[in-house]
Image: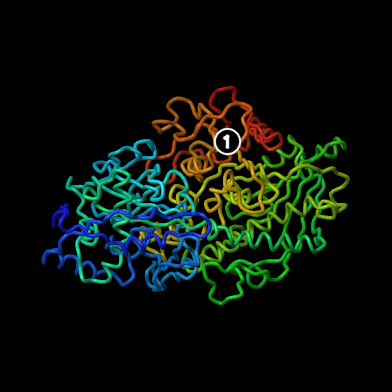
Amino acid sequence: MTTKRFLATASILILLASACSQKSDNSQTTDGESTSPEQTEPTLVARDMSPEFKIQVDEALANSVTGCEELDPSQCILPFPSNRYTVADKTTPTGRRVAIPAEGLLVNAKGIFIDPNEWNRNDGFSPNSSILTLIADLDAKSSNLPKWTDLESSLSDDASVVIIDEATGERVPLWAELDTETGGAQPLLIVHPAVALLDGHSYSVAMRKLKTTTGADVVPSPIFEFYRDGYTSDNEQLNGRTAEMEAMFTALSSAGIERSTLQLAWDFTVASTQNLTSRILAVRDNTLEWLDTHSPEFTITSIVPASQDDVAVQVAGTFKLPTHLTGDGSASQKFAYDSTTPGPNDLPVIGEVVDVPFICQVPKVAVDDSSTVLHPGLYGHGLLGSEYEIDYGGDVRALAQEADVLFCATKWAGMSEDDVGNAVVSLQDLSNFPTVADRLQQGIVNMIALGRLMNTTDGILSDPAFGDINVAGELVYYGNSQGGIMGSALTAVSPDISRAVLGVPATNYGLLLLRSVDFDQYESIMEPAYPARSDRTIAISLMQMLWDRGEGGGYINHITRDPLPGTQPNKAVLMHVAWGDHQVSELAAFNEARSLGAKIYRPIVAGGRSREVTPGWGLDSVADGDTGSVIVIWDSGADMIPIEASPPGGEHDPHEDPRDDQIARSQMAEFLFSGVFADVCGGKPCTAQQSG
């Protein structure tokens, strides 16, 4: 089989007008989002297949399960994401609906396939998806895969892996890498967009100039070669996709990528803003309406005076709030719907009234000086933790004392200590993962409600347990690690928060997990159920489609631009990143910063402390006194992260170093309460002492 077949002469040019019409119909939207440009140019169709090539194509089709993606014969779901797994649906903003077959997803060791129903409610794929395929014996070096150390190279004319926005023709910066932990199996090729993709847009992925470990050109699969070289067939399964493939080739050609050079290409559509956000916005609005029509009900369960040198009193309790989950809203429960089989546009309905835990801490400064006016603040805890983290780390108490803040916290339902058991179940059977995604959204709304009850005259802070304190001003947010990740989503959907400090944050989990030491223990739980590393890597990208609803990745396009309904404009976040972080990779933090349009503090690190050709590529520099979102790197001397997709090593994990630094906290306070960036590092790289 040859690697290139030339198109036939002009005598066999025909215009597939109906096919182009079908493509443009699928591209219509109802919310202003487009998926691809309307195609009006003639489309090339070549000669019939030779008998030898027809045998290869027929064999490839026979080996592909009905409904599976035929371009990559190694796995049903590969390449992923792909519009092969969508159908036309005029009721959705993108004009599409995900339609993964019942036996198209992964199967665990017990023979249980992932139930695709919740995934099939999406009208597209994740704006944060890691893009996956498998190319046998691929050699990363000789294929010149773009690296995260030089993102500019991914935009070069001869880049071997390319992503383009079909609506605009713009190239997406990216890096591509082979999975490192494979157990001897063929590694997946993982492509990471270096910025969140735009809601509702369609993207083409193109690969060319790829080499195998023997130095040979990668040979396209027979099915891809069929489409690339414009062959005709009487097979309806093949012909049904011809129009969309032709439109994709036209879009790539318009971006300067010729089809004859391609070894693999496909396209996919990102879920619309409505599909990504409508559930949580409905839950938020229902909850706030309920709060407006019900007097605050809360119970104080614990009063601990002078629990720390910098704490005057710690008050814990519960408040009443309706859940939108089934039953009492505990772990393993999903959203409640009126329909037993909710579709892509169905929204959760209000359910039982439940008790939500909270804890607040009054800083000692409020007792030492009774004239002190405290700022109200929410705090978000870390991975699978609890509201009591507000008391565990000295950073929260110190920031409260230094900047006159009264912090309150509740659990991140969905990823708190209460959810550990359900997380284990979900890792062993991904059909259960929708319960995690749904509870995460409820947890974000619980945090919004807690903020409202802090600022209500007869709310939580009116209880005598808090003493005679003055609390006034705009609600702010501070969170670390998971609290930084979830804080992005909270900031985007909150009607009350316009400024937040995100400590060691990132988007998204799909990128983050393979580079985090925290995932080691959870992958060991997952491995018996999904023994193949490739399946686990695919699982992470699948989970991201639902994770978007309950973490910052699904809302990243709506924090600093295109604000969501019912929220404040002009939101801004300050991101503090620990250089060489073992748990939350700075690569994911940089992705978030680029997606936000944040500025970066330079110099980001001292000379020789970055692997990037252009440190902080794609980010403008911030100046003292600037407003808007900012990312600051804090270097405490930890080892630099590895280039490959694996967790960092080294003796010291700097994950907690920035928050423990008083100078870093002074920058947080200035940002939160004056809205400006303060250069506390004097024009030099920001450094922090190693904590612990």
Q: Residue at x 78, y 60 (%)?
A: 292
Q: Which residue is mark 1?
A: 630
- The furthest residue to the bottom: 340
Q: What color scheme is it?
A: rainbow
x and y percentages locating residue 127 in the rendered image: 47, 52
314 relative to 220 in the view: left or right: right
Residue 430 can be seen in this image = no
* Residue 520, image x, y percentages: 46, 53
User: Residue 459: where, in percent of width, then height?
Assistant: 81, 55
The amino acid beneath tag 1 is: Val
Label 1 crowding class (10 Å Cα cut-off): few <14, some 14-19, many 20+? Answer: many
| 440, 43: nearer the viewer | 43
- At 59% from the left and 36% from the top, the residue drawn is 658
Is disc 1 placed on a helix, strand or loop?
Answer: strand
Up-down: is 349 above or below 400? Answer: below
In this rendering, the answer to whether 619 lies above or below 108 is above
625 left or right, relative to 262 = right
